[in-house]
Image: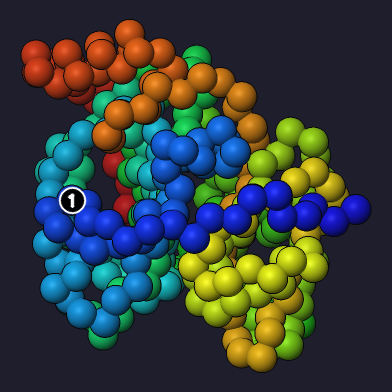
Amino acid sequence: MLRKVEKMVQGYRTRDGAGVSLVRVLGNTTADDFDPFLMLDAFDSTNPDDYTPGFPMHPHRGIETVTFLSKGSIVHEDHLGTKASISDGEAQWLTAGSGAYHSEMPQPAERMLGVQLWLNIPAKDKMTAEPFYHGVINEEIEEIPIESGKLRLIAGNYLEHSGIQGKYLPLDYYDIHLDAGGELTLDVEGEDKSAMVFTLEGYAVISDENVPEKTAAKLGNGDEVKIEAGENPIEILFMCSRKLEEPVAWYGPIVMNTQEELQKAFDDLGNGEFIIHEAKYENR
């Protein structure tokens, strides 16, 4: 049975960080419908002034951020002084966990095209998860030929193929390229799975539903999802994890489960007690 599109969100233009122009697709109002996916920001610009102000050093707690760039370059720095960068086709995965500081500074390019996803962390792990950074570079991203295109395995599993694995929640993350008129059917079995697609470039037909460009489409229950390209090539991001069905208390860069936990996080920020666990960072 096809997983049909239950909800579509195109988002709105806004600014964040030090003045970065972006489209906020998912946020506070969509957290329940897209659980465990919290925020999704999309970037698409040929004007460096839109994005080079960047996101200077800032805190996170209770989430993981996965930033994917189809085109462009971002330099990451963290509170330990680690510096790493990703570019065309690469991603970076930050487990903020119990508390981390980092910055993300996009670099001038012909085009900046990509997304940042916030993935929730289960309540039992939020304050024990140690901060961790992993740069998912092209050398470790398997590119799998499919009929009429290719599937790039950013994270998780696809058939017998494996990429970087989520420690607190599973995450299958595919960068799918289809030629004009191409199609792909993905097996997505399991009632506890939460699956969505984002039309990064071009419109698509998702399980018989027309989905415009730059749209997040939440998929309902079923066993598989069918992705079809129209008259032009498309680039689609597929993301699948496990529903948490836990309360969300969210303000700014902090996502906890209760207002008391949220207040404690901001108290920790004010008292200089935000960093609890020694962070581990990896870039390879």
Query: Is the residue 75 above or below the residue 144 in the image?
Result: above
The image quadrant of residue 199 is bottom right
Q: Height in image: 165 above or below 53?
A: above
Nearest to the observer: residue 138 or residue 274? 274
Q: Is residue 90 visible?
A: yes
Q: Residue at horizontal 9%, vertical 18%?
A: 270
In this rendering, position of residue 86 left or right of residue 274:
right
Q: Quadrant of the C terminus?
A: bottom left
Q: Position of residue 15 (x, y in %)?
A: 22, 56
- Which residue corresponds to the image point at 32% horizontal and 53% vertical from the top-left? 283
At horizontal 17% and vertical 15% (from top left) the residue drawn is 268
| Residue 66 pos. (x, y %) | 41, 50
Q: How many marks?
A: 1
* Residue type pointed to by label 1: Gly
Q: In the image shown, does 109 or 87 lie closer to the viewer? A: 109
- Quadrant of residue 106 within the rendered picture: bottom left
Q: Nearer the viewer, residue 276 or 38?
A: 38
Vertical arrangement, residue 185 with respect to residue 259, above or below: below
Residue ID for mark 1: 17
Left or right side of 17 for 202: right
